[in-house]
Image: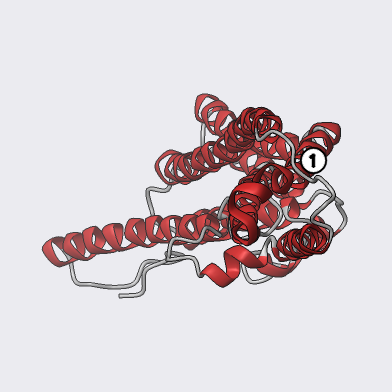
Amino acid sequence: MLLNKKIPMKYVLGKIRTELTLVIVFCISFQMFHYFFETISTNIPIAIPTIIGTIISLLLAFKSNQAYDRWWEARIIWGSIVNDSRTLLRQIIIFYDDPDFSVQANDFKEKFAKRQAAWCYSLGQSLREKDPLKPIKGLLDEDELRFVKKHKHVPNAILLLHAKDLKKALSSGKINVYQQVEIDNTLSRLCDSMGKCERIKNTIFPTTYSMYIRFALCLFIILLPFGLINNIGWLQIPLVTTIAAAFFLIEKMAIHLQDPFENRPTDTPVSAISNTIEKNLMQMVNEYRDEFEEEYYSYQTANQPIKPLKNTYFVL
């Protein structure tokens, strides 16, 4: 999930501790060599590392923008998943014909809500290459779990369960053809979002591009002390280290953002979003039940003595 609090400096520098260690060792070694072999010229025009630094800045800016676009696209897709999940359950609640408020209808809607929440959790786990069944065992019944375990692609199997239940509802007359088409369109949008996430996950950022940037960055850091040694002396050690840290952090930021489903703190917060979806869906089901329970209670009080309905959900 995203880090929304103050990030400790220890965590930030820990991402580049190896690179910084090598830079410090190199700068100290270079300074000692210059101190003991002062007669040997180690100076080069500062313009040379400056030109290389300008080129690296442009390359890093381009890479950072491309990486952020991938991260932002992933966040937009999961925003669509939130909206489509709410739309799906709203359609199920409103379209499903249930004049008697039966137990069967309530179970159907509640099962649909839990299954959709399970789809969100399993999709997030699959994108992070973790066990997609672990967070959904409490949301699916035994038959559904046995069904999804037979499939390598768990989220796709859950969407198939959605489609099967819609077919049963259509056959039993609980929804009509037009309503079934509308709900199926929502399922298609969810499937499209799943495919878009998998495209981002499986499309690797060009390796050669990252390799060339790293090569140019190392060349820049190696040449920088040669241009500063005669001007600032020992101060080139902290200065070069600080400049190197800035460039390495920008590069590391781009590397993290370009893969938004790698279970890092900078990832798209798919688990938190899935948890929000689950809460929203279950609240929608509960509010629908409470609303009709109150209407039924008022009707019975006004017209006849209160008594339980046969094969109904509410026990009064």
User: Along the line of sight, which residue is nearer the eye, 6 or 251?
Assistant: 251
Q: Position of residue 111 (x, y in %)?
A: 57, 58
Q: Is residue 308 above or below residue 20?
A: below
Residue 271 visible within the image: yes
Q: Is residue 76 above or below residue 20?
A: above
Residue drawn at (63%, 71%) of the image:
138
User: Along the line of sight, which residue is nearer the eye, 2 or 216?
Assistant: 216
Tell me which corner region of the image, top left, top right, bottom left or bottom right, holds residue 310: bottom left
- Position of residue 234 in the picture relative to residue 293 (left or right): right
Q: Quadrant of the N terminus?
A: bottom right
Q: Quadrant of the C terminus?
A: bottom left
- Position of residue 145 in the picture relative to residue 87 (left or right): right
Q: Which structural element holds mark 1?
A: helix
The kind of residue on which mark 1 rests is Leu
Residue drawn at (55%, 55%) of the image:
269
Colour scheme of the rendered structure: secondary structure
Q: Which residue is mark 1?
A: 219
User: Along the line of sight, which residue is nearer the eye, 144 or 30?
Assistant: 30
Q: Position of residue 20 (x, y in %)?
A: 71, 61
Q: Position of residue 85 (x, y in %)?
A: 51, 45
Q: Is residue 248 above or below residue 102?
A: above
Q: Is residue 185 above or below residue 15?
A: above
Residue drawn at (74%, 37%) of the image:
44
Q: Position of residue 197 (x, y in %)?
A: 68, 39
